[in-house]
């Protein structure tokens, strides 16, 4: 595309930062609202906003993975080398997810059940997803020619996303892999130790479908036709997103279902299509805002948070849900919880600045003036 790498890719961190803010508000209101406020329409809208961070994080992980694989291909790295690099990165994220669970269990020692050590959280799923994306991509690279390789990789990623979405309702019900020990089955359908899949966990089915969708999107954006279209290629994502939303709503409105158990909100491929369509709309809006709007003028709090999304995720959990919560759980009005949300958001932004710039440079960064954010090209 015609723009600089920073303006092309800054929107990725902007979206990651948006996911962080949506995550903060969901967690803060869920942890702190009490009494009538907990059952208010406000709380319902807050939880609705909370349906976007996990798909966004996974979609952007897939997009970033495509960028990394494209760079490795330009360095003439073999399929085995690409697999090694991506699988290693995925394993690192998975290890961090396991370490996070150990930390949470240690801090909560005395009242947290031991089974929390095996909870499949978003970090675990991102790690597993990156491993799977690396394996699938390396298989395609090793077994196909270099001609139109990007299109082949995008097709394989799209097929993987569709397969995961279509199989999810079955693997949560009639095709459950009950022969697996529950810590392993939980990675398939989120069963945990509770006897049935839990919608508050993040198993491969359906969540990894969002990562593969992001992988396909990334390869399509870096294909020859998209490069020739320039910015228009990203803007064409908006009508594609609308098409997915309308298709999902249309399919859901049909009376015929191929599944013995149909759960629209948790396992339905139709809901996956609708959320994927919304993600694509987010992509188009974020790209436009960062390229032609105010997204990268001066200091951008969202881009800053996006640069350190793993850190702020890790830390904020303990100050919202954990032993060191800054407010008593389930005891606040909307106003009280909102004050806590603002405090958490500002604290995480300050932590992010310290992490990337250090205290001496914080004042300089906060000064109004054009600064180019670092592109988010990592997995």
Image (cartoon, helix red, strand yellow):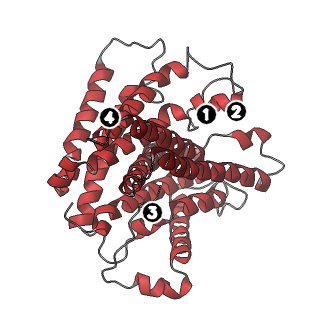
Alpha carbon distance from label 1 to label 3: 26 Å
**Residue at image x 59%, y 19%?**
176
Mark 3 or mark 2: name the one nearer the start of the chain.
2
| Left or right: 314, with 46 as reference point | right
| Between marks 1 and 3 in the image, the one whose residue lies nearer the viewer | 1
User: Crowding at label 3, few (<14), some or many (≥20) Cα neighbours within 10 Å?
Assistant: many
Label 1 sits on a secondary structure element that is: helix
Alpha carbon distance from label 2 to label 1: 7 Å
Query: Residue 253: image x %, image y %?
Result: 30, 20
Alpha carbon distance from label 3 to label 4: 28 Å
Q: Which residue is mark 3?
A: 306
Label 4 sits on a secondary structure element that is: helix
Mark 3 or mark 4: name the one nearer the start of the chain.
4
- Residue 361: numbered disc: none
Q: Which residue is mark 4?
A: 155
Label 3 sits on a secondary structure element that is: helix
Res 267 visible: yes
Alpha carbon distance from label 3 to label 2: 31 Å
| Between marks 3 and 4 in the image, the one whose residue lies nearer the viewer | 4
Q: Which residue is mark 1?
A: 187
**Residue at image x 55%, y 84%?**
359
Alpha carbon distance from label 4 to label 1: 25 Å
Q: Which residue is mark 2?
A: 183
User: Picture quarter containing residue 336?
Assistant: bottom right
**Residue at image x 45%, y 18%?**
262
């Amino acid at each position: 595309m015609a723009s600089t790498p920073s303006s092309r890719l800054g929107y990725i961190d902007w979206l990651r930062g948006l996911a962080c803010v949506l995550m903060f508000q969901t967690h803060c209101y869920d942890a702190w609202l009490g009494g009538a406020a907990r059952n208010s329409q406000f709380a319902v809208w807050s939880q609705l906003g909370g349906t976007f961070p996990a798909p966004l994080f996974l979609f952007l992980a897939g997009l970033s993975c495509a960028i990394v694989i494209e760079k490795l291909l330009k360095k003439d790295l073999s399929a085995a080398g690409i697999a090694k690099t991506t699988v290693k990165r995925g394993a690192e994220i998975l290890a961090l997810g396991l370490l996070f669970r150990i930390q949470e269990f240690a801090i909560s020692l005395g009242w947290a059940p031991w089974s929390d050590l095996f909870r499949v959280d978003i970090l675990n799923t991102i790690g597993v997803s990156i491993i799977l994306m690396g394996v699938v991509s390396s298989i395609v690279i090793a077994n196909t020619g270099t001609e139109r390789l990007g299109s082949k990789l995008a097709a394989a990623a799209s097929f993987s996303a569709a397969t995961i979405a279509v199989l999810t309702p079955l693997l949560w019900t009639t095709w459950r892999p009950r022969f697996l020990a529950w810590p392993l089955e939980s990675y398939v359908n989120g069963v945990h130790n509770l006897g049935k899949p839990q919608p508050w966990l993040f198993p491969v089915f359906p969540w990894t479908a969002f990562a593969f969708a992001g992988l396909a999107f990334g390869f399509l954006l870096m294909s020859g036709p998209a490069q020739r279209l320039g910015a228009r290629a990203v803007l064409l994502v908006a009508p594609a997103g609308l098409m997915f939303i309308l298709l999902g709503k249309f399919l859901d409105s049909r009376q015929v279902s191929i599944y013995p158990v149909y759960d629209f909100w948790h396992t339905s491929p139709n809901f996956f299509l609708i959320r994927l369509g919304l993600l694509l709309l987010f992509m188009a809006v974020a790209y436009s805002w960062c390229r032609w709007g105010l997204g990268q003028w001066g200091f951008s709090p969202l881009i800053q948070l996006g640069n350190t999304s793993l850190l702020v995720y890790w830390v904020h959990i303990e100050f919202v849900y954990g032993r060191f919560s800054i407010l008593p759980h389930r005891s606040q009005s909307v106003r009280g919880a909102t004050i806590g949300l603002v405090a958490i958001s500002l604290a995480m932004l300050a932590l992010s600045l310290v992490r990337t710039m250090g205290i001496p440079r914080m004042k300089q960064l906060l000064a109004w003036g054009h600064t180019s954010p670092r592109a988010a090209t990592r997995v």
